[in-house]
Amino acid sequence: MDLRFSPEDEAFRTEIRTFLEEALNSDFAAVRGRGGPGDDDCLFDERLAWERHLGAHGWTCVAWPAEYGGRGLTLHQQVVYFEEYARARAPGRIGHIGETLLGPTLIAFGTEAQRQRFLPGIVAGTELWCQGYSEPGAGSDLANIQTRAHIAEGHWVIDGQKVWTSQAHWADWCFVLARTNGAVAKHKGISYLLVPMHQDGIETRPIHQLTGDSEFNEVFFTGATTEADHVVGAIDDGWRVAMGTLAYERGASTLGQNLMFLNEWDEVLALAQHNGRVADPVIRQRLLDTWIRLRLMRLNAMRIMSSAHEAPPAAMITKLFWATLHRDLGELAMDVVGPHAMIRTGDDADFSRLQRLFLFSRSDTIYAGSNQIQRNIIGERALGLPKEPSR
């Protein structure tokens, strides 16, 4: 693993840094530092304009092959891109689900007709996507999905419910896991469908969070339809495609996430220095421990991405590590704020940035596989321990 950047990488760093600084210091100054987890409902129109500005200047989908609208960046250049994006405090990406999940899935598993139909809209920021995976009885046990789909008159007809669907209230399309064969084992008989959101057969209901926002949703499908050829991969082979999608979620963007966490740590440190809590030896040690864990997160991500194996066993610790780290950072932030953490101190009596960090980071250890599930995966698949007894 070579963590050094070449002269070409550093020239690329200057290019993206210059673009971001010019844009975020002028037309898009209002969205700087906004959006992302816990703040994703803010300034939608302005951030959509930012998304399209990125697309118009070739700064979306940078890891994709050039033939599909990307830049075909090397791994090191992807790291540079995501780190500089976070360092500039650029806004949370509205198009990230399409860019980081659906797009790479279509490139790997889709037909050429599907790529030509759907990839340009993701690159340009003109079509937004959401992910239809989790259900009330199928969260960490995703294969337990009950949403069903069948072919009728040349269309898929879909009935069921999805939950915790990020950005469904904005999305134009949803990639939906639906059971298309109930006579086989639950990991089989699932298909991966591309479904338009703007139709009478789909109802979206917001889920209100501790922060008061509702970036997550319940989505109800009642006779919703999509074209027969809007299935990715083979019919009944959607589980394999879905696992491919989840693998893309752990890519180079993890380095950007790491730097966003470091930005939050910097804010906590600055507050501790301002209000004198840095003089408390326990607070000081917790600040140092968190900084060390942030460095470990970065180095481990680099090690995993540099591995010759597509998904080395060490990758299994990633979600558990960063989720616990971020939750602990939120708790540290409140202890640094002190008694005022109990009072809304943001603009218009809203939550402050650090209060939002604390409230939202509680969910990190639950979504995308809870900490308990992650430990089971590590024990069974990485360490070879016996499976947890079935009830």
Image (cartoon, rainbow, N blue to C red):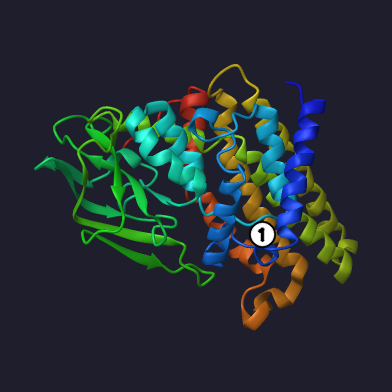
Horizontal side, residue 4 vs residue 104: left or right: right
The quadrant of the picture occupied by the C terminus is top left
Q: Give the residue furthest to the front.
A: 56
Percent of width and height locating residue 151: 13, 40
Secondary structure of the residue carrying tag 1 is: helix
Q: Amino acid at mark 1?
A: Gly
Percent of width and height locating residue 262: 74, 50
Residue at (45, 37) in percent of width and height: 103
Q: Is residue 145 above or below residue 379?
A: below
Q: Is residue 354 above or below residue 156?
A: below
Horizontal side, residue 89 vs residue 184: left or right: right
- Residue nearer the viewer, 30 or 66: 66
Horizontal side, residue 161 vs residue 18: left or right: left
Quarter of the image where one finds residue 46: bottom right
Q: Give the residue furthest to the left.
A: 153
Percent of width and height locating residue 181: 16, 34
- Residue nearer the viewer, 254 or 198: 198
Percent of width and height locating residue 351: 62, 74
Q: Give the residue furthest to the top.
A: 308
Q: Is residue 370 visible?
A: no
Numbered-mark total: 1
Residue placed under numbered mark 1 in the picture: 330
The quadrant of the picture occupied by the N terminus is top right
Q: Is residue 215 visible?
A: yes
Q: Is residue 43 above or below residue 195?
A: below
Q: Residues within 10 Å of mark 1 (few under 14, many from 20)?
A: many
Residue at (76, 22) in percent of width and height: 2
